[in-house]
Image: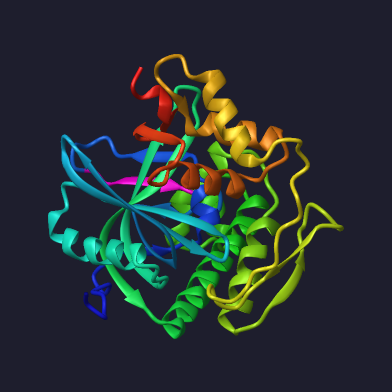
Amino acid sequence: MSGTMRVGRQTAIRVFAHEYRDASLPDQGSGEYDPGYMVTRLGAKINRALICGLIDSSEKRESDSGQSYRFNLRDVTGIHRVEVSPFNPELHPEAEEIHARFEQGDRFLLMVVAKQRSFQTEDGGVFTSYNAQEMTVIDKPRYAEWLAETADATLRRINAHELAMAAEQSMAGFRSAGVPEDLIDGMLLSRAHYPPFETEVYMLDVLQALNAALGRSVEIVKPDSAIESESETAMPDQPVAAPPPATSDMSVEEVVIATIAAGDRGEGVDYDTIVRQCSVHGHSREEAEDAIDSLRAAGGQISEHRFGWFRLIQDDSS
């Protein structure tokens, strides 16, 4: 596996998992060959991204289309979901090596250049992931560098969003307010699509990333609660303080299984519905994502029979 990555020609946006996970606005050009984007709440127009994280799960799949791989990478804000598709066979040797290392118990940091990918459920929910184009294992200093770069890019978008909120919602208005030229188009789309939100949730990501890059562990009070706090760690192989217990009489895994059992009418249950039900029971989106991944792993209790739709394993034979 190559120790360096050819990123010079890539228009790869640095983005944390949290910002991309919150995105729900696909933007596809009208022409046959126009690129497709995912527009985030902070106005990033993502066609291609440069992401990093500790490998958290690995799965190899066989389908009618051929072999594919799925990896989860965890940064300080959440999970990046990455697929190496059957239609990218030149990347399969590297993906096989990564998968083999994970299966042997190795845990390492991975950098990926990937194209955005999304799936929309029938009720309008949007499930985001990435299609990998290039991958390489990196060391802690390079991860720290990515954290700092991505924090800087996120902060730039936060500042642009604050400028846009006080400006006339037009290209001329944003330009006059000082919104950077390269962010205006995405900001216009974002402002028209997303309801108002507090940028502090993304400022928290920036603070977590910068403290991790500096090798610190810091207690940060979340903006929506003066009581809850969590400890974020400097690097992904250091211990992380356990999150506070969810306010639910069911574990997040039990909620996932119960939701699928109750809602499957032959098509399975979509990802958005499962996450929403977990939220109703007091579990965070990240806890729901982790539970789905755990239950979907080899020998688990649920299967993803098509992208973004899940069934209980025992239902597959019926």
Question: Which is more toward the observer, 10 or 66?
Answer: 66
How many numbered marks does the figure carry? 0
* Residue placed furthest toward the top: 265
Classify 268 as above or below 297: above
Question: Which is more toward the observer, 153 or 286?
Answer: 286
Query: At which x and y percent is residue 91?
Result: 18, 60
* Residue placed furthest toward the left: 90
Question: Is 188 left or right of 4, judged from the image as shown?
Answer: right
Query: At which x and y percent is residue 33?
Result: 18, 42
In percent of the image, x 40 and y 19: which residue is there?
267
* Residue placed furthest toward the right: 227
Question: Is 73 left or right of 258, judged from the image as shown?
Answer: left
In percent of the image, x 61 and y 48: which residue is there?
287
Question: Which is more toward the observer, 268 or 102?
Answer: 102
Displayed quadrant of residue 117: top left
In percent of the image, x 77 and y 57: which residue is there?
223
Classify 165 as above or below 155: above
Query: At which x and y percent is residue 76?
Result: 57, 66
Displayed quadrant of residue 18: bottom right
Q: How is the image coloured?
A: rainbow
Q: Is residue 22 visible?
A: no
Image quarter of the N terminus: bottom left
The part of the chain drawn in magenta is 34-40
Q: Is residue 95 visible?
A: yes
Classify 18 as above or below 25: below
Query: At which x and y percent is residue 280?
Result: 70, 32
Q: Is residue 275 magenta?
A: no
Image quarter of the C terminus: top left
